[in-house]
Amino acid sequence: MEYLQPALSKGRRSNDLWLIAHTLENLGLAFSRLGQPEKAVASLDEALSIFRMLAYPFGQALVLDRLAAAHLSAERFNKAIEAGLEATALHAAVGNQLGEASA
């Protein structure tokens, strides 16, 4: 976490959307692993929005996988299913069979 916040600040200062999105995705994963699903969802939602704006389906699929896990840990089962299904479809669309199988 100590390296992610400075990276996020740097990305925001320079308006580097790729750096911002990837850093937010990593922050979301860290918050999930720390048992903080609300913070995870907030970070991941922002990352997903940026990856959609950048039209980067692989990044979208990865973030949706992480969102599904965060929603699951917060016992928001319908949201977890929705995110997982969307992730599966995106993995299939980009030909990522491993991602499709694990989504």
Image (tube, rainbow, N blue to C red):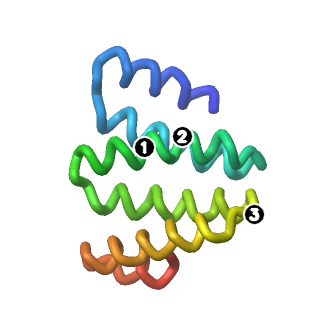
Q: Are marks 3 and 1 in contact (CB under 8 Å)?
A: no
Q: Which mark is residue 43?
A: 2
- Callout 1: 10 Å neighbours few (<14), some, many (20+)? many
The amino acid at mark 2 is Ser
Where is residue 7 shown, x and y percent of the image?
46, 26
* Residue sitting nearer the eye, 3 or 92: 92
Q: Amino acid at mark 1?
A: Ala
Q: Which residue is painted at 50% across and 66% down in the image? A: 83
> What numbered label is drawn on residue 47?
1
Q: Which mark is residue 103?
A: none
Q: Residues within 10 Å of mark 3 (few under 14, many from 20)?
A: few
* Element class at badge 1: helix
| Percent coordinates x, y for residue 95 in the rendering | 26, 79
Cβ atoms at labels 1 and 2 below 8 Å apart: yes
Q: Residue drawn at (39%, 64%), measured in percent from left and top?
A: 61
What residue is rendered at 46% in x and 76% in y? Answer: 85
Residue nearer the viewer, 62 or 89: 89
For residue 36, side relative to residue 45 (left or right): right
Kindly identify the residue that appears in the image at 65 percent across and 39 percent down: 39
Q: Residue furthest top?
A: 13
Q: CA distance from mark 1 to mark 2?
A: 6 Å
- Label 2 sits on a secondary structure element that is helix
Distance in Å between CA atoms under marks 3 and 2: 18 Å
Q: What's the distance in space between the residues labelled 3 and 1, CA to CA?
A: 21 Å
Please state if 58 lies on the left or on the right of 81 as rendered: left
Q: Amino acid at mark 3?
A: Glu
Q: Which of the numbered marks, if any, corresponds to residue 75?
A: 3
Residue 17 position in % (x across, y down)? 30, 33
Number of numbered tags placed on the structure image = 3
Camera-nearest residue between 97 and 44: 44
Q: Earlier in the sequence, mark 3 or mark 1?
A: 1
